[in-house]
Amino acid sequence: MKKILKAFVLLLFTLISTSIFAQLDYDKWEVVETVDDFGDPTGESVARYFSKGTFSNSATTGEDMIVKLVDYGIKDDGSGTAQLDFYEYNKNPASLAYDTEKGIIKMKMPDNSVKTLECYALKSGGLAFWGEFYTELMAIVNNGKSEKIKIVVNESSFGDTGSSKYNGYFHTKAADQVK
């Protein structure tokens, strides 16, 4: 009976996760209100962007993933934060480091030049951009041109372990989307 219950819970989780991600608006920036741990609106908002991508590791090649970029904005103290998340198989959050580690992400610009930006792989998953790393990323994101920026992240650039590679993209904000 326990095995049946576990299988049912796993199936239910998979269906719910799949249906949540299926309802996402891809390839456009949107501003959404944040909620607290109880689901109540906080009165604050973030800008977010979802796109599709692929990932590869020692067990698989070219599998689908979801890319999520969130701009949490600039706080009263002048500091800003953004986070880039990858969802392997369109549902499982990727973790690129066992501890918070500094590394790099590569971005191919519309003119085919490649920029390398520093960021932090978080122990809890995702890549975080703070301080000057946030400022550098936002200079690209907020260029007002709605340009496609390709990204490549190698797990190995954040530590000694891991061979995963993440390929995705985002569009920069159009002029009317820049705050």
Image: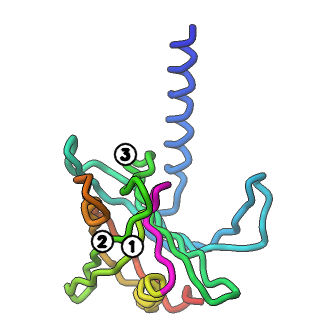
Whether 141 is drawn above or below 64: the answer is below
Picture quarter with the C terminus: bottom right
- Assess disc 1: are there few (<14), some (14-19) or many (≥20) residues with their C-alpha within 10 Å of its C-alpha: many
- The residue drawn where x is 43% and y is 57% is 99
Tell me whether circle 1 and circle 2 mark residues in contact (CB < 8 Å): yes
User: Helix, strand, or loop for circle 1?
Assistant: strand
Q: Amino acid at mark 3?
A: Tyr
Chain-order first, disc 3 or disc 1: 3
Residue that label 1 marks? 170
- The residue drawn where x is 36% and y is 53% is 65
Does the segment drawn in magenta span residue 125?
yes
- The residue drawn where x is 67% and y is 88% is 77
Residue that label 2 marks? 151
Closer to the camera: disc 1 or disc 2?
2
**Observer-nearest of 50 and 43:** 43
Residue that label 3 marks? 89
- Assess disc 2: are there few (<14), some (14-19) or many (≥20) residues with their C-alpha within 10 Å of its C-alpha: some
Number of residue marks? 3
**Observer-nearest of 98 and 148:** 98
Q: Range of the magenta residues? A: 122-131
